[in-house]
Every structure is written in C-alpha cells, then in structure tokens.
Amino acid sequence: MTHPALHTAACDLFGVQYPIVQTGMGWVAGARLTSATSAAGGLGILASATMTFEQLTDAVHEVRERTDRPFGVNLRADQDDISERIELLIRERVRVASFAQAPGERLVKQLRDAGVATMPTVGAPRHAEKVAAWGVDALIAQGAEGGGHTGTIPTSLLLPQVVDSVDVPVLAAGGFTDGRGLTAALAWGAAGVAMGTRFLLTKESTVPNTVKDVYLGTAVTGTVVTKRIDGYPQRVIRTDVVDHLEHSGRMTSLPRALRNALGFRKLTGTSLRALVREGLAMKRKEGLTWSQVAMAANAPMLTKATMVDGRLETGILPTGQGVGAIDELPTVAELVARIVDEAEQTLTRLEKGTGTGMDKGEA
C-alpha cells in the first residue's frame, strides 16, 4: 500500500496513482513516452506545440490505444489552430491541458466548463496569482534549475512562495530526479513533482541514443542558461555551439534562419501570418533585434535537428540541471516505481527520526 502522503490533491485532480508528472517536452514527449508514464501511474503529457493538428490527433489516439489511464496535452495558446486543438481535447476527453505560456482567461473557462483541467507553468509568485485568478486547476512552479525556458528563482525559494500565494495544487519542477526530491517537494507544500529531463532519459524516450549519451555524460556544472538561442533565458547543455553563441551572439545568417523558420512553419502547420505576427510581438514586447527574432524563429528547428535527427553538431540540447544526477536509462515503469519506493523509504525514515547522519548525543 502506498504511503498516504503520496496520495495528494494532484492525484485526485488528474485521476492518477502517483503525484508524478512527465512534462510536455517539444520533440520528445510523444505517444510512446506519454502512454508509458500514464500506464506506470503518473501523468504523461503530450507535446503538441511541435505537432501539426493531424499529428496531435494521431498521437492522442495512439495514447488511447496504449493505455486507458488519464493523460494530458501541452498547448501553445498562441497557435493559429488553438480552438481546434481545444475542441479535440474536449472531444477526446483528455484529462489535462498544460501550458508553458499563460493561456488566457477565456481558454481556461472553456476547458474547465468542458471538464478539462488546466495547468500552466509559472516562474514567479506574481504569475501564479495572475493565472490562479483566471480559475486554473493546478500550477507547475518551475525553478531556475529547470530545463529549456526557465526563470531565475531557485526551486527551493520559488515553490514555497507559489504554494502560499494560491489555493490550487502546485507541482514542483526544476532539479527533481528521484524519490527524495519528491519528498522534499511535498515538505515544501507541493502536491507532487513535474520532471522533463528525468523522463527524457528513459528507454521509452525516442531521443537518439547518441544524444542520450551526451546527456548522461553531462555534469551538474555542465549546463548554462543563455538568451542567445531565441532571446529568452533557456537552460541547455553547454556545447561548443552554445559557447560560440555566448561569445558572438549569432549562430547563423539571417537567410538561413528564415529558411529554418519557414521549415518549422511547414512541419507544425503554422501560418506565415502567425509566424510574422509572433516575430513582431517578440520584437515589440521583448525588445529583440531582427537578428534575435530570426534566431528565435530558428530555434525550434535547431532543437529538432539535435533531439530528433541526432545531429549533435547543431548543439542545442535543452536540459534541467538535474541531468548531472542521472547516469542510466531505466524504463519508465522502473523509474516511477523507484521514485515511489525512495519516497516511501524517506518518509518512513523521517517518521522514525533516523538517518540524520548524526549519532545520538552529537547534536
């Protein structure tokens, strides 16, 4: 029987056995990884931002064929076909819609009214308060240790502040890899953990093995947060390409960046109008130069080249800082079972007051 502390409000909200979420990593979180996570008792989340609508439809159906457990879909609220994607989630009775960006009050209400739980990711308490006021069902609070686009506040400081500022379940993200981390998150007031890199490094992950080997060989100090890829802070593995970006601020020519951006548009079904609109918005809101806008549009294709095609020379490998604590590739079922077992052992040890590292009388 699972320890009572491991059955949280998130378990009830998501309809899952364990408070463990596999995040919707672009180019990584496909049907195989998502279904394996859900089948193991956690919540798997499909990454739809890098899929066309037809690919997302197929992926949802494939997850359904692989498992009857609840799962989620990660969405970009600014996609041209967001209405169709939301209708798909509602029609297919997907349990959770997660967002890396603020979804907007209208989308939150539409999903909630249809019985789909909404869960955006935040990196600051004020952002948590804003989306909570819209009626979201849960939040992921991602600390600076998290992979890909991330904030500046360490998880240990961000998480308690977010938990104290909202009345919905909060999932902790950023630096979590094992059961001890899950227990720590619960102690900070979280309703569970959300992990990306740890699930990327499993057997069900479709990332090429040559790329996984680079991740496994990366130390805790082997990552860097850079704005040089797309103008936003992003934690990646430090490579020669990233070092070149940091020193020059430029990876490629404007024409090549635009060609790759148009390639991404074709792959994901994004309209040219939406691509231009997004570029103008980034330039206006973030104060980016046209060169930076081109790089931002180019970034998804650079990431795909590495994470899907295995072209390590591209050198863009998003990762959480926890990568340095990972040295093997378990199956998802083995990973989830181990996390739960470690968490139960840790909770039992704390309840008994043992394992403090001090003999009696040393304190």
Image (cartoon, rainbow, N blue to C red):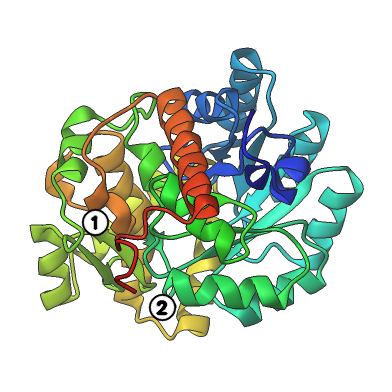
Circle 1 SS class: helix
Residue at (34% x, 30% y) in the render:
202
Q: Is residue 309 left or right of residue 149?
A: left
N-terminal of the pair, mark 2 or mark 1, is 2
Q: Is residue 301 above or below residue 30?
A: below
Extreme residue toward the top, this view: 65
Whole-percent x, y for residue 94 in the image: 74, 34
Q: Secondary structure at mark 2?
A: loop
- Residue 211 is left or right of residue 295, and the answer is left
Q: Amino acid at mark 2?
A: Thr
Residue of label 1: 256
> Which picture quadrant has residue 326?
top left
| Residue 34 picture location, percent across and down | 53, 30
Q: Residue at x 82, y 49 (%)?
A: 111
Residue 145: x %, y % from top left? 36, 65
Would you name the residue on which mark 2 appears?
152
